[in-house]
Amino acid sequence: MTAEIEQDERASALRELLGTRSIVLVGMMGAGKSSVGKRLARRLALPFADADTEIEQAAGMTIPEIFEHHGEPAFRDGEKKVIARLIESGPMVLATGGGAFMSEDTRSAVARHGVAVWLKAELDVLLRRVRRRDDRPLLKTADPEATLARLIDQRYPVYALADVTVTSRDVPQETMVDEVIEALACHLAPPRSGDET
């Protein structure tokens, strides 16, 4: 069997296991949620949505502008509403912003309508990636590395509540997609007869 046919069969099996649920990618800025998410959606023939892009469209301004004009609490409130609306219309692959999963309301909505996948990355990997862009409001500080380390300390215990964890590292994006599909298939597969649960 060729690798391509095998990939197609694995994708089809995973879509069946998902049913109407969405795959919700969570993790820090720079973990690869959008880039992996787009490829994952393509592989699974599902729609892709980026919560940050959807928030910007709904607000008619960029995320840095929302932070500047309305503050982080207003942004988080809008984020919660947008994510709830998106995952209720699933199935899809949804990339969320780094702080989204910190909301208990969002975690509950994801639990009802989706499967949460944490793309977990080490600090050095995240730093390398986020330095390529300057549109991260939370990193507009005197010491972005210390800020990122503090956010990791706050967020990783909550991200650990996700259904599935996949380590994000510097490998080809398609490798990451394969690993996410494999992890989801293992998580969603019914226990084989004879397995103790």
Image (cartoon, helix red, strand yellow):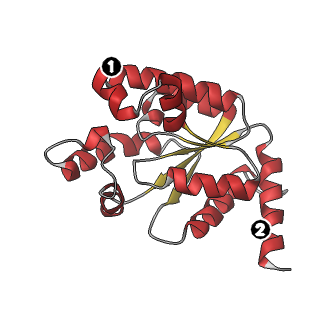
Q: Is residue 79 above or below residue 27?
A: above
Q: Which of 14 and 56 is in front in this view?
A: 56
Q: Is residue 14 above or below residue 182?
A: above
Where is residue 39 shown, x and y percent of the image?
63, 58
Q: Name the residue under label 2.
A: 7
The residue sitting at 48% across, 55% down in the picture is 32
Which element carries disc 1, helix, strand or loop? helix
The residue sitting at 42% across, 41% down in the picture is 98
Q: Residues within 10 Å of mark 2 (few under 14, many from 20)?
A: some
- Residue type (three-letter) at the residue carrying disc 1: His
Q: How crowded is mark 1: few (under 14 residues within 10 Å), some or many (20 or more)?
A: few
* Residue 105 in sight here: no
* First of labels 1, 2 by sequence position: 2
Which element carries disc 2, helix, strand or loop? helix
Q: Mark 1 points at which residue?
A: 70
Q: Quadrant of the N terminus?
A: bottom right
- Residue type (three-letter) at the residue carrying disc 2: Gln
- Residue mark closest to the camera, 1 vs 2: 1
The CA distance from mark 1 to mark 2 is 45 Å
Q: Please indicate whether residue 62 sits to the left or right of residue 134 in the image.
A: right
Q: In which quarter of the view is residue 81 placed?
A: top right
Q: Please indicate whether residue 40 sits to the left or right of residue 135 in the image.
A: right
